[in-house]
Amino acid sequence: MSHSTQPPSYPAIRFITNWGDALAILVAVSCMAVGIYLTWLGYAWPVGVAGVAAGLILWLVLRSYVEVLRILADTLMPR
């Protein structure tokens, strides 16, 4: 009795490695847009500046996460 075992597919990792750059940009731009929108609604201008700064920092963190995940996927995941 033989069992054919297939290696795990890890769909979430594949999704992030394929679409991570676009997702990082989308999340960062959304954060910036919320900050600018809140300033447009009448909040103080530092809210807009904080939204833009948070968007840039978020983009940097997410982009580095995607790069690390790509390195791990290339070296550790079966093809």
Image (tube, rainbow, N blue to C red):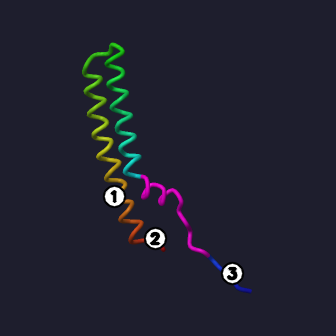
What amino acid type is highlighted by mark number 3? Answer: His
Q: Earlier in the sequence, mark 3 or mark 2?
A: 3
SS for callout 1: helix
Q: Residue at x 28, y 16 (%)?
A: 44
Query: Where's residue 26, x and y in %?
Result: 39, 41
Q: Earlier in the sequence, mark 2 or mark 1?
A: 1
What amino acid type is highlighted by mark number 1? Answer: Glu
Q: Which residue is denoted by mark 2 in the rendering?
A: 77
Query: What secondary structure characterizes most of the magenta part?
Result: helix
Instruction: Tell me the quarter of the picture where residue 53 sits.
Output: top left
As for residue 17 lying within the magenta part, the answer is: yes
Q: Are marks 3 and 1 in contact (CB under 8 Å)?
A: no
Q: Which mark is residue 3?
A: 3
What amino acid type is highlighted by mark number 2? Answer: Met
Query: Where's residue 30, x and y in %?
Result: 39, 34
Q: Which residues are magenta?
A: 6-19
SS for callout 2: loop
Q: Which mark is residue 28?
A: none
The reply, left or right, for residue 74 in relation to residue 3 is left
Badge 2: residue crowd in 10 Å (few <14, some 14–19, many ≥20)? few
Q: Which mark is residue 67?
A: 1
Badge 1: residue crowd in 10 Å (few <14, some 14–19, many ≥20)? some
SS for callout 3: loop
